[in-house]
Amino acid sequence: MIISKLEHPDFIYYDLHSEEVYSNYINQTNEGIYADRLHSITLERIKDQLSLDDNTKNLIFDFKNISDTQPNLHSYFGDLKNNRFKILFLNITKDLIKQLEFNSIRNEKNIEDNIQVFDTYTRIPKEEEGYKCFYLFENESEVFFNDDFNIFDEIFNKKFKEELKKCREDYTEPHSSSFVYLSSYFNIRKLVSHNKGFAFYSIYKLAIRIIYESRQSAWKTFLSNCNIEEFNKPTLVCQSLTSSYIVSILANMLNFDVLILDKIGPINKIYNTLNKNIIEDKDYIIVSDLVCLGTEIKIAKNIIQFLGGNYLGNVSLIKTETLDSKDIFKENATLAVFSIDNANNKELEFYISTNLEPKPIEESTTT
Amino acid sequence: MNDIIIHISDLHISDQSGKLGNAFKTTYLTLDDEKNYNYIKEFTSALEKIKCNNKYLIITGDITNIAEKNEFEKAVNILKIIIDDLSLSKENILLIPGDHDVHRDSIKELLRDNPDSTSIEVNKIKFNNFNLLYKEIKGVDFDANKIIFDKLVIDELVFLGVNSNMKIDHHGGVGYLDTKSIENELKSIREEGKEYVLCLHHNLEGEFEDKGQWDEVNKKNLKRIFEGNNIKLILNGNEHTPNSKLLAGSVINLSDSGVFASKNEPTASFKYYEIVKNENELLLKNNIKQIRIINGKSESNFGSWITINLDEIKTEIKEFIFKTKTNLPVLPIQEELPELEVDDELPELGVNDEDNNPVDEIKIYENKDFQQKIYSIIKDKSLFQQGHFHWSESSRAHNWINVSRMLEDNKDLQMINDTIIDLIEQFDLDRDTNLMIGLGYEGNMIASKASMKYNFPYTYFPYSYRSKDHLDFENKLDFDNSEGQYKNVIIVTDVVNGANTIKKFILERETTFFKNVEKIILISLFYTGDKVLNYKILNGETFKNIEFYSVKHLKVEKCPYKDYNYRDECIILKDKLNCVHKFYNEKLVSK
């Protein structure tokens, strides 16, 4: 199975780091997203899949987060070239180009630049010499990619939206945990059931964001320049059936421990007499499949804090932006891979309403 | 003070001349009486320092090296010193023969004289020299043709002397017990209220080799017999390394005391088990002593017997538990316990159906590495809980395995996921599968890695007792099977007892989907029911098409009272003697 394949009329895109993480996962090498060495087993999978589908001859391999390769991987790309595939590498260091023995290729579009790479364990970003785009051919007229093109926004997000539409379930009852009406629910289990590869890729994206956020944002820093094993790692908290699936995979990717909060109510009776499973001053991240109004997150947060744990934040595959992002306090913001917002909720046929009269349009535009 | 059982093995008392056979060069015990005396005196003085009530001695074989008369003569001298120093009576000793106590030249001579000798005659003659020792110490002849030939009774604990050398001949061989004979002998011996420990020479599992020194086919059949006869502990020797472990795929403990008089590696060792017994529990506390040469001026020529801290070594189980507060009935004494109540709403699954489960067809998951790790998590984190647990009004137990806590440590979670994959691959279960379903939070989490590894689709489903906590669409499978495209389905869950949850899922909640399913493969982390684990035990009147595989069998005690009176009769619940916990919302269900 290939997890990161994104199709565009002009090319097919593969995210090699995510594919390497997937290879490690199914082959029980539990390195998670800290794996940064590309192996032949990953390229074998891609090659096998490509032989079945060769409609598009333009291939993009994204090397972001890959800092090393197994020796002798040159032949995989060489074979693809011989099969008339046009290949573009994204975000690749000069060292890797040399390692893969493609440093003799001359193409004016292969422009040397500083690219962002990440420390294997701490994910601290640093600059290194490399190429944002490196074509494995010399004919400039065959260049098929504009380096301003945002793959995440232009392809991943659109694909996610299409997958989400398939998950929509009509719902006519009042919302079960908040006093609002919802036009529909999104059954994220359907995404796992019918496109588990894409679900895994989305969880991978979330894992990368969690680590990135830990570096960049107001989240308490839990990573430092020492060995990952010694970090005070946060615990991932699941509180629904779908989030238990996400957490199980995220735990592998991040090497974080897990807490099943769903049963905190009843199980607490036992743990109070034996031992509590929420540890005082330990950091907790609540994981969801979809955050709508955040009611469940608040309940979970209160339980964690009541028992002495430190609520670090919440993450989700999907969040609903009922407020403008500038109106949300950073600490309450959900870190997500996909947002349902005013730009797409109509297309997704997802509406939230109350029994109150809506604010007149002319007034809302003046505020 | 408690009683202790001293366990020694593999003395290999050896004639160092090598005239009659190979000498065991690295043993302290030879034909030299003086050296033997000093070594044994060090041993008995170490034991005299242990504060205890009565002492018992079990020797699990290979007392000599080549079973010559001169070696057994020295063995008599050695044992007499031990008996005198420790004030042991002959009834308090079990002497088990090992393969090195089989005199191979005697077999050859018998066969030279009479090539048609029966196995009974061969068995008798091969232990003639061993019998010199046995008769001198025990006062009776050794019955070489009986599998269970002696017993040592300490209140409700019965240690059975078992001869695993029936297939050892002049060429050698491995451990073996005739299954029909051992089953019959165990049945004839068993008494209500007794706990039986088997004492034999050969190791059923190996610390250094996967299979142990035992006939592989025989071992699998024996596991079933041992489990069926509630055997919880086997004392053995033969490996020359002290260790304790579980017999793969079971909860039967194995304990080897190591080599008794080795000069080199592995270091000489013995064990003693302290019998801990009170109103609520019965267990053997495991202790190891090893010879360590520290070179102190006050030390003997052999070194010192040092107590090994079991916390520091991972190859030992600290306690062999026969009864705990959990499985001792905390119930008013009755002449006869009431019948166990099954879920009224559905017919009970069939019992072992002869047609479906022929005795010779055994498919049980085995990977002692994973199984031991999983058992260790439960033990180390105390996740085998006791109290009164309800999954519905009719589904109640006095124990519960806290699987959600098991999954908290990422390394454990990944290891358990890897175990599920290992199980699938061991039986090639992925080959024709069309869909896999994770049941409940825990089932969903332990199946997550397998869900990504295999090409067939995956989905998950809430437990029936939690269905009211979920929205309607969450309580329906996302797959339509009206065309019968999902013929083979794997269901992964954390615990299976009577399989009522599975029945409800298949027969009530997803009847339409499962109507067109031809084969269901049920995989669980734990089986907590009463039956002897095998892959067709859930088949019967209700189902004909379930294959069941479980990583571990850990039996839990059900609440033995009937649905209509358990609230008044079960004192754990009534008087809240321990944790009382419901896994479902009573109010929601009664709605």
Image: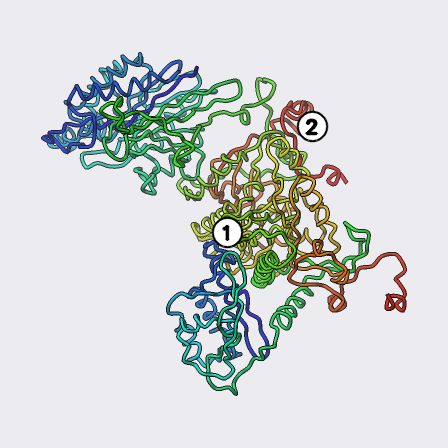
Look at mark 2 in the image and give the residue it sits on: B564
Q: CA distance from mark 1 to mark 2?
A: 55 Å
In this rendering, the answer to whether B114 lies above or below A238 is above
Dot 2 falls on a residue whose secondary structure is: loop
Chain of the residue where label 1 is placed in the rendered structure: A
Kind of residue indicated by mark 1:
Ile
Quadrant placement of the C terminus of chain B? top right
Residue B548 lies, in percent from the top left, at 50, 45
Residue B71 lies, in percent from the top left, at 17, 24
Q: Residue at x 47, y 50 (%)?
A: B418
Kind of residue indicated by mark 2:
Tyr
Quadrant placement of the N terminus of chain B? top left
Chain of the residue where label 2 is placed in the rendered structure: B
Observer-nearest of A78 and A215:
A215
Dot 1 falls on a residue whose secondary structure is: helix
Q: Nearer the viewer, mark 1 or mark 2?
A: 1
Look at mark 1 in the image and give the residue it sits on: A228
Asked which quadrant contains residue B561, the reply is: top right
Observer-nearest of B75 and B138:
B75
In this rendering, would A79 be left or right of B35? right
- The mark found on residue B174 in the picture is none
Neighbour tally class for label 1: few under 14, some 14-19, many 20 plus, Cα within 10 Å? some
Q: How is the image coloured?
A: rainbow
Residue A346 lies, in percent from the top left, at 77, 68
Asked which quadrant contains residue B260, the reply is: top left
Neighbour tally class for label 2: few under 14, some 14-19, many 20 plus, Cα within 10 Å? few
Asked which quadrant contains residue B194, the reply is: top left
In this rendering, the answer to whether A325 lies above or below A220 is below
Residue B138 lies, in percent from the top left, at 27, 15
Q: Is residue B52 visible?
A: yes
